[in-house]
Structure formats: C-alpha cells, structure tokens
Image (cartoon, rainbow, N blue to C red):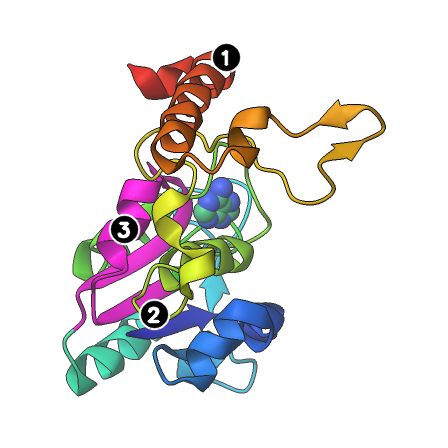
C-alpha cells in the first residue's frame, strides 16, 4: 500500500510513522508513506497557498491551483483508489471504512487548514471526505495520522497473531470483552474463574456474552 499525504505541515506527522507498529510496517516495506509540502506547488516568493474567501467572511481558503497541480502530478504517476479529504464535514470514520481502505493500493490524503479548501478541488479530485469526529481540529494532519493508523494496522502482515485485529472492538459491531493477565488475584479482585478453566468453547461463549452486555451498557446504538 502507498499513502501520499499532502499538507502545509508535513513535519507534524512524522513521529507516528517512525514509532512502533507503523514504523515496522514501513520498515518491512508493507506500506510506503510519502509527504508532500503543498507550498512546493505554489507560486511566488511567498509560496502562498491560501487567500481570502470570495463574498467575504472570516478565515482563509486554501487555493485551488497548488492543490490541483500537486494532485494532478501524483495522479499522472499512478492510479489512486481514493483521494481523501480530511474535514470535519466528512463522513465519520468507522471501522468499516478502515476495513475497506486497508485493501486498497494507492491513497491520497489531503489535510485542510484555515477555513478549508476551494470547493473546486472537491469537484475536481476528492472521492471521499472523512471526519474523525464531531469536533474541529486546527488542521487535518492529526486526523490523517488517525486515519492512517486505523488502516495500516489492518494491512496483512502488519500485526502479528498476538495483536490480531480480528478480536478488536467494533470488528463485529461489538465492544471488546474484559481482559486479564497475571496475577490471578490483585487487591482482592479475582480473574473470572471461567478464564482459568481451560474450556476454550465456554470461554468464547463467556467473552461473547460479556461483549454483548458491555456494548448494550456503553454503546447501545451499535446493537441497533
Ligand atoms: N480537520 C479539522 N477537524 C477535523 C476532523 N474532526 N476530522 C477530520 N479532519 C479535520
């Protein structure tokens, strides 16, 4: 998988890909992540990428030309499955979206800033708009990292068996059941006996019942 990330602040996104599981995915060559400084596509010595909105109003708008040039150049080099704009008015990120994106080959992420991007960029290039939640960040960079993390961990070969994504919360629309490790008792709190029984089938049933119960307590909307 290849992910191209377009941003005015690419340095903000470096460390997540240089640490832990994402770093291993990159080092193993399973995923390539390329950052593109949008200012490299702007004109003039000020490397301007934003301007005032037509019709007035607060905030600046990211200009169509640098974004169009950057995306057009990338598209001339390979076919992209999706060109994704990170924006609070996009569809809310869900596990099902991460699952779908994890089986794609080439993705572009566009990080917005200021008031957002000129509408014509959406019309020319954007195939998906994703929000990571109903709140506004200073820019799309942290959202791009969240989206990349949720996708990359699902790409075959990235997680080992012990970290398997199949038992994650949300993978079957259920939250995960409680988990325990040693010691068997701590400050009077005991590990449920069933987990020590060695009865694999009964343990699976117990975990499923717990998952249903916890989901109905904390997130009943997921069961609808
Ligand atoms: N940019 C600013 N806020 C955002 C959000 N909630 N999700 C995605 N991109 C954003």
Q: Is residue 193 left or right of residue 99?
A: right
Task: State whether residue 46 is above or below residue 118.
Answer: below
Q: Nearer the viewer, mark 1 or mark 2?
A: 1
- Tell me residue 98's x, y (percent): 32, 50
- Helix, strand or loop at disc 1? helix
Q: Which residue is mark 2?
A: 67
Task: State whether residue 133 is above or below residue 27.
Answer: above
Q: Nearer the viewer, mark 2 or mark 3?
A: 3
- Tell me residue 182's x, y (percent): 70, 45
Q: Which residue is mark 1?
A: 217
Of callouts 1 and 3, which one flags the residue occurring earlier in the amino acid sequence? 3
Of callouts 1 and 2, which one flags the residue occurring earlier in the amino acid sequence? 2
Q: Which residues are magenta?
A: 80-109
Residues at badges 2 and 3 in contact (C-beta under 8 Å)? no
Q: Which residue is mark 3?
A: 99
The residue sitting at 38% across, 37% down in the picture is: 200
The residue at label 2 has a CB less than 8 Å from ligand 1 = no
**Other residues around mark 3 within 10 Å, as few (<14) / some (14–19) / many (≥20):** some
| Label 1 to label 3: alpha-carbon separation | 25 Å
């Amino acid at each position: 998988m290849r992910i191209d990330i377009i941003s005015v602040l690419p340095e903000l996104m470096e460390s997540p890909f240089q640490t832990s599981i994402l770093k291993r995915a990159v080092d193993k060559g399973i995923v390539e992540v390329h950052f593109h400084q949008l200012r490299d596509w702007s004109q003039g010595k000020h490397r301007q990428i934003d301007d005032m909105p037509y019709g007035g109003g607060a905030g600046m708008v990211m200009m169509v030309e640098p974004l169009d040039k950057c995306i057009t150049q990338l598209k001339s080099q390979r076919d992209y499955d999706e060109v994704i704009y990170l924006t609070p008015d996009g569809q809310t990120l869900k596990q099902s979206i991460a699952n779908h994106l994890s089986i794609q080959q080439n993705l572009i992420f566009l990080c917005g800033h200021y008031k957002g991007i000129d509408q014509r960029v959406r019309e020319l290039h954007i195939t998906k708009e994703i929000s990571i939640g109903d709140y506004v960040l200073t820019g799309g960079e942290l959202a791009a990292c969240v989206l990349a993390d949720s996708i990359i961990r699902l790409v075959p070969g990235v997680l080992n068996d012990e970290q398997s994504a199949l038992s994650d919360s949300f993978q079957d629309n259920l939250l995960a059941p409680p988990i325990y490790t040693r010691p068997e008792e701590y400050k009077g709190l005991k590990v449920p006996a069933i987990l020590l029984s060695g009865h694999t089938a009964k343990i699976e049933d117990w975990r499923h019942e717990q998952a249903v119960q916890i989901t109905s307590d904390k997130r009943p909307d997921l069961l609808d």
